[in-house]
Amino acid sequence: MLSPALIAAILVVGILALAPTRRMYDAGRARETVGGYFLGIWALGVLVVLGPARTRFVIPLLIVLYIVPFISWRRGLARLLGRPADVRPPPRNVTPQPRNVTPPAPDEARGAR
């Protein structure tokens, strides 16, 4: 059976992996890409927790993978080339304008003027 400390460590690694994952989701990446990224960074974090012998190779990779979603390559290149930066895409959960479903007044319904 797993110890409570190991379960807590696995949960903390998962919570820490959520920040760059959310950043990728907000940037408009596909769900599959975001999910694969989360599982990959979570698995590497669990490897660090489970085996100290692997940390020499895994920690630098984990740091790079954690930081990459926070770098905006397009905006940085646009700044270097003197172009205006792209505008952020609209949020994904935008609700459409509500329809006017109020029935017309009785006079308007009959065509009175």
Image (tube, rainbow, N blue to C red):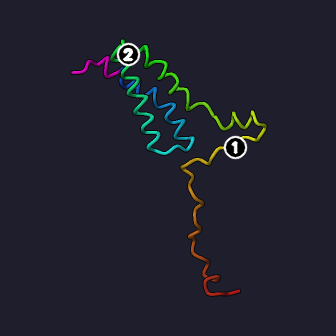
Name the one closer to the observer, 12 or 70: 70
- Residue at label 1? 86
Quadrant where the image shows the N terminus: top left
Asked whether 6 falls inside the magenta stretch, the response is yes
**First to last magenta residue range:** 1-8
Question: In the image, is 107 to the left or to the right of 12?
Answer: right
Earlier residue among tags 2 and 1: 2
Name the one closer to the observer, 82 or 2: 82
Question: In the image, is 79 to the left or to the right of 66?
Answer: right
Distance CA(mark 2)–CA(mark 1): 40 Å
Quadrant in which residue 36 is drawn? top left
- Picture disc at residue 110: none
Quadrant where the image shows the C terminus: bottom right
Q: Residues within 10 Å of mark 1 (few under 14, many from 20)?
A: few
| SS for callout 2 | loop
Residue at horizontal 35 percent and vertical 24 percent from the top: 10
Nearest to the eye among marks 2 and 1: give it: 2
Note whether 34 is above or below 51 in the view shown. Answer: below
| SS for callout 1 | loop
Residue at horizontal 36 percent and vertical 17 percent from the top: 49
Question: Looking at the magenta stretch, what is its main secondary structure?
Answer: helix
Quadrant in which residue 37 is drawn? top left
Callout 2 amino acid: Arg
- Residue at label 2? 54
Residue extending furthest toward the left: 1
